[in-house]
Image: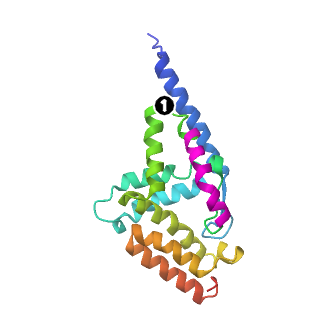
Amino acid sequence: MLRVTIAPEEDRLNAQIAFAIEIDKLKRIIRRNHLIDGSRRENTAEHSWYVGTLAMVLGEHAPPGTDLQRVAAMLLVHDLVEIDAGDTFIYDPVEVAAQAGAERAAADRIFGLLPAEQGMELRALWDEFEERKTPEAKFAKALDRFAPILANHHTEGGTWPLFKVRAAQVREKVRIIEEGSPTLGRYALELVELSVARGHLAE
């Protein structure tokens, strides 16, 4: 006998599919950073996948008791707002000043596509990441900041010389990494100092 889906289930699935179609747009948002092989710039979906995977690989460097599944989930959704707000270059104070309002509006719209309780769950992850108060959010933000430093170091400075970024600006971002993981913070600072020594980052 043919099973007929009842309307509430059908509406729920339609909402989930609408969200699935919408977040595919993240693949077209191009970031400033290049891939580590230097072949091209990465898109934001690739970045989200990458840092989400790093949460599992580098999880032992998180504070004891950190919920790494929550960290990975946070990283998978943290940049969905870029579908509307675009990628913000963290060394551009004008872009950063305009970022918060645009991203909140984007979060309202994008997570609002989902069934209410799912939308609230994912929005809560996004809010937690932005507020950076929990160990999970601090570690997630640390990985988000660590990845571009790693990429720039391995591409002879990457975006740093291109946008005239100086070492003091990068060291400031390293402090955010240290908050989430002292071990990764120390490693990131070593990469910064080595990049300066090699002439790939201006002092």
Disc 1: which residue: 115
The residue depicted at 49 percent of the width and 74 percent of the height is: 174
Q: Is residue 37 visible?
A: yes
Count residues near mark 1 (Cα–Cα under 10 Å), then give few for <14, some for 14-19, many for 20+. Answer: some
Magenta span of residues:
93-109
Note whether 90 is above or below 7 in the view shown: below
Question: x, y percentage for residue 101?
Answer: 60, 50
Q: Is residue 97 magenta?
A: yes
Residue 71 in magenta stretch: no
Tell me where residue 117 sits by quadrant: top left
Q: Is residue 16 left or right of residue 136?
A: right
Observer-nearest of 95 and 74: 95
Q: Percent x, y for residue 181?
A: 39, 69
Q: Secondary structure at mark 1?
A: loop
Which residue lies at the image location 53% right of the left edge and 55% below the top edge? 48
Q: Which residue is at 69% across, 64% downward?
A: 40
The answer to whether 162 appears left or right of 187 in the picture is right
Q: Position of residue 163 (x, y in %)?
A: 70, 73
Residue at 58 percent across and 33 percent down: it is: 18
What is the x, y in percent for residue 139?
41, 63
Quadrant, the N terminus: top left
Q: Amino acid at mark 1?
A: Pro
68 shown above or below 61: above
Residue 149: which quarter of the image? Answer: bottom right
Q: Residue furthest top?
A: 1
11 or 57, which lies in front? 11
